[in-house]
Image: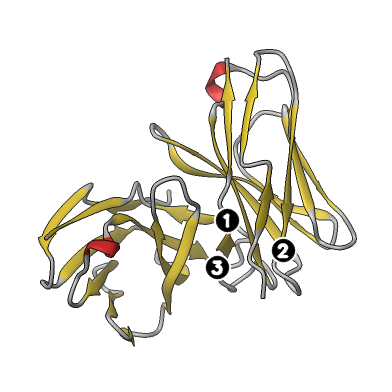
Amino acid sequence: GEDVEQSLFLSVREGDSSVINCTYTDSSSTYLYWYKQEPGAGLQLLTYIFSNMDMKQDQRLTVLLNKKDKHLSLRIADTQTGDSAIYFCAESLRGSQGNLIFGKGTKLSVKP
Amino acid sequence: KAGVTQTPRYLIKTRGQQVTLSCSPISGHRSVSWYQQTPGQGLQFLFEYFSETQRNKGNFPGRFSGRQFSNSRSEMNVSTLELGDSALYLCASSITGVDSPLHFGNGTRLTVT
């Protein structure tokens, strides 16, 4: 069955890089997503990558995809206190309508 | 462009009652999906609508239902509320619902007492 795994917590110092990792099990994934959730808010789409790509960069965000190992990572450069939030990895399966499989989320704490 | 709008933001209901939540998608988006978020189970897919038709459904009891209108706005209904239905209910819209990114609203926080 489908499953997406993430570590639950990550703590970094302001100005450092953060790397949040995710593994997924279903090889029929078409797109993989990263969402950010701040307290009391919904999910904000940060970035996404098509499954035939290896890397995508968008300003401070870099997504790396290792399809062979089914491993996805999100790197945030120059992490700021405003980046403190929960980050969710999600996969969409081929042909699936509106149904993303989410990980449990990684809580990123940025210390000044 | 306005984002996904969900109303109300907060609801408090009593066991046994029913509730209706509303979602207005981003203009031009025809697919609306609903998710339940709880601390224990995380984010779980409820159902997806496209052109007023339910195309996909998650593993939830029949007490959870939804509909979509011709303007793509959607509502979900939960009947005979149980304490375990307390959750954040998130609506997401996308252009087609298949291989197009989902954009989420801020959710409706439902508390059942």
How many residues crowd mark 2 within 10 Å: few (<14), some (14–19), many (20+)? Answer: many
Report the residue at 59% width, 56% height from top.
B105
- Give the CA separation, mark 1 to mark 2: 11 Å
Report the residue at 11% width, 60% height from top.
A112
Q: How is the image coloured?
A: secondary structure
Report the residue at 39% width, 53% height from top.
A38
Residue A19 sits in which quadrant?
bottom left
- For marks 1 and 2, give the one nearer the viewer: 2
- For marks 3 and 1, give the one nearer the viewer: 1
**Which residue in the rendered view is the most extreme toward the right?**
B70
Counting the numbered discs, the total is 3
Q: Which numbered disc covers residue B31?
A: 2
Residue B16 sits in which quadrant?
top right
- Give the CA separation, mark 3 to mark 1: 10 Å
How many residues crowd mark 1 within 10 Å: few (<14), some (14–19), many (20+)? Answer: many
Dots 1, 2 in contact, CB < 8 A:
no
Point out residue B7 in the picture as x, y percentages from the top left corner: 69, 45
Chain letter belonging to callout 3? A
In the rendered structure, which amino acid carries the disc numbered 2?
A: Ser
**Residue at the spot of label 3:** A94
Q: Which numbered disc covers residue B29?
A: none
Q: Find numbered disc 1 in the image and state the secondary structure of the residue it sits on.
A: loop
Q: Find numbered disc 2 in the image and state the secondary structure of the residue it sits on.
A: strand
Point out residue A11 in the picture as x, y percentages from the top left corner: 13, 55
Chain letter belonging to callout 2? B
Same chain for labels 1 and 2? Say yes or no: no
Dots 2, 3 in contact, CB < 8 A:
no
Q: Which numbered disc covers residue A99?
A: 1
Give the vertical position of A63 relative to B82 (above or below): below
